[in-house]
Image (cartoon, rainbow, N blue to C red):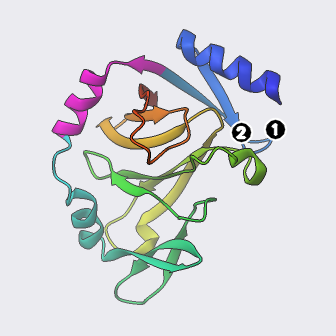
Amino acid sequence: MKLNVLFISILLLLGTSISFAQDDDDIEELIWEEISSEQYNDAVLLESNPRATADRFNELGLEITFDCFEICESFLVEEESGRSLFLPADFDQGILDAVISPAGNAFVVYSSYDGPEFDNYYDHRAEIHVFNVIGDRGLDAIQFSESFYIRDWSISNLAWFNDQNIYIKTYTESRSFDGQSMDFKYYKLEL
């Protein structure tokens, strides 16, 4: 496993496509490209409407709810019927965010863990789950697309660049509250 992690790290440095998988039968080919912090910040500024995701879910008659007791679980709930869809997150704190694409036809949820002992509990440090919006109303409009699991780094933030690409702000250190500065890296991911 350590050899795989080293190989993936080298591929990331080279900007090569990488396969992440939950198991050998479900390999997703990803294309990563390292970008500058300025490119990332420009994308975040373009996506300056913090209400965009909530507004789009409201149009669909959906809302995100959280159920937190020792662990947090997140759900998309259909307002009319009360039906719910679990938003996947392997980590105890649940999802970090749900972010809608610029055209409103897809969204991602992501979660990350950054404790130094992550490999004692988890097989990966971060995860991204992609959903398509294929209808006009309710949970029937939501279709799961794909998941990606990342072992080498944690996600600090994520923003859509366009409807096919997301920008990700990452770090490899354990997040510390002792004033230590983080060494962030930025990537463009083609979905």
Give the prevailing secondary structure in the magenta stretch: helix
Is 160 placed above or below 145 here? Answer: above
- Secondary structure of the residue carrying numbered label 1: loop
Instruction: State whether residue 1 is above or below residue 111.
Output: above
Whole-Å distance between the Cαs marked 2 and 1?
A: 7 Å
Q: Using the image, determine if residue 144 lies above or below residue 12.
A: below
- The residue at the point 48 percent across, 41 percent down is 155
Q: Which residue is mark 1?
A: 24
Q: Are marks 2 and 1 in contact (CB under 8 Å)?
A: yes
Identify which amino acid the numbered label 2 is placed on: Ala
From this view, report whether residue 39 is shown above or below residue 174.
Answer: above
Residue drawn at point x = 34 percent, y = 85 percent: 79
In the rendered structure, does residue 36 fall within the stretch colored magenta? yes
Residue at 50% of width from left, 23% of height from top?
A: 32
- Which residue type carries mark 1? Asp
Q: Position of residue 143 (x, y in %)?
A: 50, 60
Label 1 Cα neighbours within 10 Å, binned few <14 / some 14-19 / many ≥20? few
User: Magenta region: which residues?
Assistant: 33-46
The residue at 42%/36% (across/down) is: 180
User: In the displayed image of the protein, which residue is found farthest to the bottom?
Assistant: 81
In the image as oriented, which residue stretches furthest toward the top?
14
- In this view, the residue in front, 39 or 165, is 39
In the picture, measured across the screen, residue 1 lies left or right of residue 39, that is: right
How many marks do you count on the picture?
2
Where is residue 138? Give x, y as percent.
Answer: 38, 75
Disc number at residue 12?
A: none
Q: Position of residue 72 (x, y in %)?
A: 54, 72
Q: Is residue 162 visible?
A: no
Helix, strand or loop status at disc 2: strand
The answer to which quarter of the image holds residue 19 is top right
Magenta stretch contains residue 107: no
Q: Which residue is mark 2?
A: 21
